[in-house]
Amino acid sequence: MQLSGNGHLSLVELRRGEHGILDRLDLPADISQRLMELGFLPGSPVVAAGSAPGGDPRVFRVDGAEIALRRETAARLILRASNPEP
Amino acid sequence: MSGCDDCALAALHPPETATGAGVVAIIGPPNSGKSTLFNRLTGLRQKVANYPGVTVEQRVGNATLASGREITLVDLPGVYSLSPRSEDEQVAHDILTGTMPDFPRPDAVLLILDSTNLGRHLMLAAPVLALGLPTIVILNMADDLKARGGEIDVQALSRQLGAPVVLASAARGDGLEGIWEFLAERCAPPAPVDASALETIPKCRAWAARMGKHAAYQAPAPPIWTRRLDAVFLHPVWGPVIFVAVVVTVFQAIFSWARPMMDAVQTFITWTGNLVGAALPASPLRSLLIEGVWSGVGSVLVFLPQILVLFLFIGILEDSGYLARAALIADRTMARVGLQGKSFIPLLSAYACAVPAILATRTIENKRDRIATILVAPLMTCSARLPVYALIIAAFLPERPVLGPLLGTRATAMLGLYLLGFLAAFVTARVLKSSILKSERGSFVMEMPPYRRPTVRSLGLRLLDRSKIFLRRAGTVILAVAIVLWIFAHLPLVHGQLPAVEHSIAGQVGHAIEPVIRPLGFNWKIGVGLITSLAAREVIVGTLGTLYGMEPDARSRGLQQALRQDLTPAGAVALLVFFAFAMQCMSTIAVVRRETAGWKWPIIQFTYMTVLAYGGAFLANRIVSAFM
């Protein structure tokens, strides 16, 4: 399993049907604002739904909608560690 | 309707505003049903589609209130917020704040939100209500909300927002009374919005959640059918298979289903032509009517059924929500040429017409991606090429089954031409994106709307609209070119007699350019057609109809027969290739100039496409000749 820099998982690591809590968006301001408007807010639960037949882009379920993102974008959306940190 | 009891407050508002010519803006997030509502209220035709970003130009229509008063409705682009980042948001922002030049600030706002996803959609309410314009909040898709077990207390939401709120279903026409009432009475401006909601996106979302909670909003169950359908349409194996099957069906339908209707139109045109011919004495007027108008315009009109079948399919794909999935499937391939899934939707619309496609590029935030998409869009096979392709294919290719009854030779040839345009667009995009329009790999972010059943009403409006556009073109550009051509084909008089076509002005012009087009396998008649088709591609069909219609024996054989005798198969293939690549369309040139703010890009584009068309046709002629 691929880990991002600080050991936290990103949306890319979610397998189909799995969910995680979004921690932060590691992206330039304009694109992260756009994503936040679509529901990718820190603290929001995100579920990995389907994907294009080739596996990229992937579809995520967030805030009542399904949003398609390319893998490289999804890899910059960092999830909260599933176990509460000490 | 709730909250317009608040309209008692309207007494505070100067009554003049209620009697003046009102301008009312419709705003909402993408895919909230704005355009459907706009159609409902105005009856004006408007493109409605089930994917984000269709409304790219502010469309304006009139609606008549019960009192007889006329109001003007403006359909703004779908936006998630009013912070101007893309061209669409800039337009919405400028119009609502009254900073759009030459555009009056709206007197009232219809804010339309998807009631099945209210939590997020309410976020747009904060900046819109903060504008201080009288606003009604329309919770659309109420039928869907109810069917999936969602709930909302409309009265409570109205109290919370300080503005009237109605539940409605624009698609079914439910709940419109409340909107008409609002338009007639004109409520007071909304209560001020909690300032914190305007600070950051998370604070805005929290505000929206609070509003929803106070209104006892119960989100509906997830759209089960959408998930089931996506499991099939995005399936690793079935997804692409279905995609290809859909495309093949469309092409086969254009040829086989439209055929009886086309024959009927042809019969009607021949019949009326004979009727007119019999009623008039032999005179230049009769000749103009029969050879100019009937042959010229009639030969184009025959293709209306085919174009309507194409638009019916595009309409079903768009309205059902399948198109957004197609964009998703296409993104990987688009990325390979340096574009993105968002370019896919304009490019797909370009199969209908390049003009709306070029307008649809406004949703692309990256400027270089946008220019690249504009430059390649006219290479996609638009519906104006259909009559040209159909005529040549039907004249030269006998219909035989290729894949049983499913796919015939003619549909295959048509599919091949569509593929040719697609490949040309692709290669061009690739070259552009790796040279003069190079930019960093962008992102692709797109909402997948739930699947919806296309309504007969919406599809019907589309076809009606398309027929009007087609008939208007036939009645103006094509008719004018046909008449001018007829005149040029009958002058100058030789000893007071009509000249043979070859010696007319049109014939001389055709002969003058013949040396240039001879290497492509074209004769002078095609040359005249190439010139007239600079106005619009399908004009060549009418021109050939007129030119061949002037030769008595060719007229009796019909245009297809006449072409088959006059043009080699290699020349026919070359002609198809020429039309696949050439930018024969004044409207497209005009819209590219407008959208790129200058002549630079349209000139580059026209030159490139003409060179490509000439080179491609030359090669096609050589290659096919070598094999025949």
Image: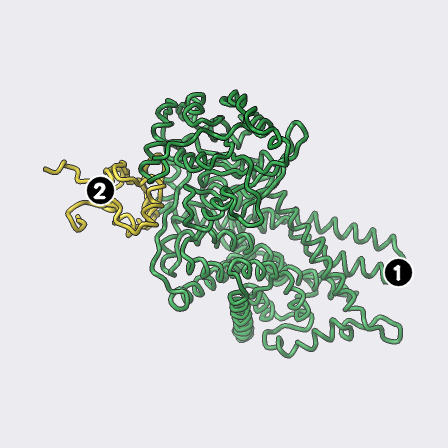
Chain colours: A yellow, B green
Most foreground residue, B577 or B436: B436
Q: Chain of mark 2?
A: A
- Whether residue B216 is situated above or below residue B293 in the rendered picture: above
> Where is residue B44 drawn, in percent x and y?
62, 40
Query: Which residue is situated farthest in the left direction here?
Result: A86
Amino acid type shown at disc 2: Leu
Which amino acid does the dot numbered 1 rest on?
A: Ala
Which residue matches tag 1?
B282
Q: Residues within 10 Å of mark 1 (few under 14, many from 20)?
A: few
Dot 1: element: loop
Marks 1/2: CA–CA distance: 84 Å
- The residue wearing badge 2 is A79
Left or right: B386 as drawn, with respect to A36: right
Residue B317 in sight from this viewpoint: no
Q: Which mark is residue B447?
A: none
- Looking at the image, can residue A23 be seen? yes
Give the percent coordinates (x, y) of residue B212. Answer: 37, 27
Have a look at marks 1 and 2 and say if they share a chain: no
- Taking B245 as reference, is B581 left or right? right
In the depicted structure, whether residue B327 falls above or below residue B179 = below
Q: Residue at x 48, y 55 (%)?
A: B347
